[in-house]
Amino acid sequence: MSVKSDMWIREMSKKHGMIAPFAEGKKRKGKISYGLSSYGYDMRVADEFRVFAGKPGAAASDPKNHDEALFQTVKGKHCVIPANSFALGRSVEYFRIPRNILTICFGKSTYARCGVIVNVTPFEPEWEGFVTISIVNGSSAPVKIHSNEGIAQVVFLESDEQCETSYADKKGKYQAQKKITSAKVQ
């Protein structure tokens, strides 16, 4: 496997719509950086969040029986995540991953320095959609997440060979998601 460069990411995005909308460069005055970097792409978080609002003594959050009532929808220029809680967000960008590519996401260091952990699973070959992002506030104080600004970096890895079965071939349950998508078990 090899890591793909900014030139490859730009070309694949412009010719094949791999990332849309695509943002050149990263630095934006007064904003948490986003867009194309040397060997990756810093995706943004959109302006809608699902903040965990479970109460002490409530039933467990269960991926096999996901309860939407445990979440509160927040829409706006920012989202405040309570101490030791989390929210789900989605990317501004829509991704279309080629068959010979796998991605890995890492949270931005700006948020990590505030106690925020960003978790996004790898984008499998031929997965497409808006990314559902888990944003965990591991600190003992509330933290503010800024909409339409950088949240995580996506690194693209190219395989030396095609995979036998892609995410599209499997008809994956999170294929072509258009909104924040909660846990599903089929």
Image (tube, helix red, strand yellow):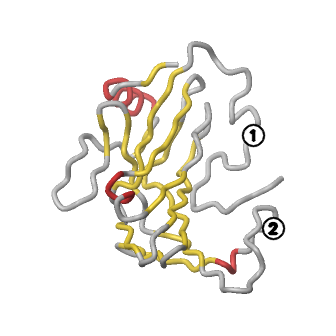
The relative height of residue 131 versus residue 84 in the rendered view (above or below) is above
Q: Which residue is drawn at 47% across and 75% down?
A: 81
Q: In the depicted view, which residue is nearer to us: 180 or 2?
A: 2
Q: Which residue is drawn at 35% across and 52% down?
A: 109
Within 10 angstroms of label 1, few (less than 14), some, or many (20 or more) residues? few
Q: In this view, does 131 lie to the left or right of 112?
A: right
User: Residue 160, which numbered label?
Assistant: none
Q: Which residue lies furthest to the front in this view?
A: 140
Q: Residue 56 placed where, x, y %? A: 68, 86
Q: Mark 2 — residue?
A: 65
Do residues under tags 2 and 1 come within 8 Å of each other at their CB atoms? no
Q: Mark 1 — residue?
A: 171
The relative height of residue 61 versus residue 132 in the rendered view (above or below) is below
Q: How far apart are marks 2 and 1 (CA)?
A: 21 Å
User: Disc 1 on helix, strand or loop?
Assistant: loop
Q: In this view, does 41 lie to the left or right of 131?
A: left
Q: Residue 10 placed where, x, y %? A: 34, 30
Q: Residue 24 placed where, x, y %? A: 26, 40
Q: Residue at x 40, y 73 (%)?
A: 143
Q: Toward which corner of the image does residue 63 lie, by quadrant?
A: bottom right
* Residue type for callout 1: Lys
User: Disc 2 on helix, strand or loop?
Assistant: loop
The relative height of residue 28 versus residue 11 in the rendered view (above or below) is below
Which of labels 2 and 1 is toward the front?
2
Within 10 angstroms of label 2, few (less than 14), some, or many (20 or more) residues? few
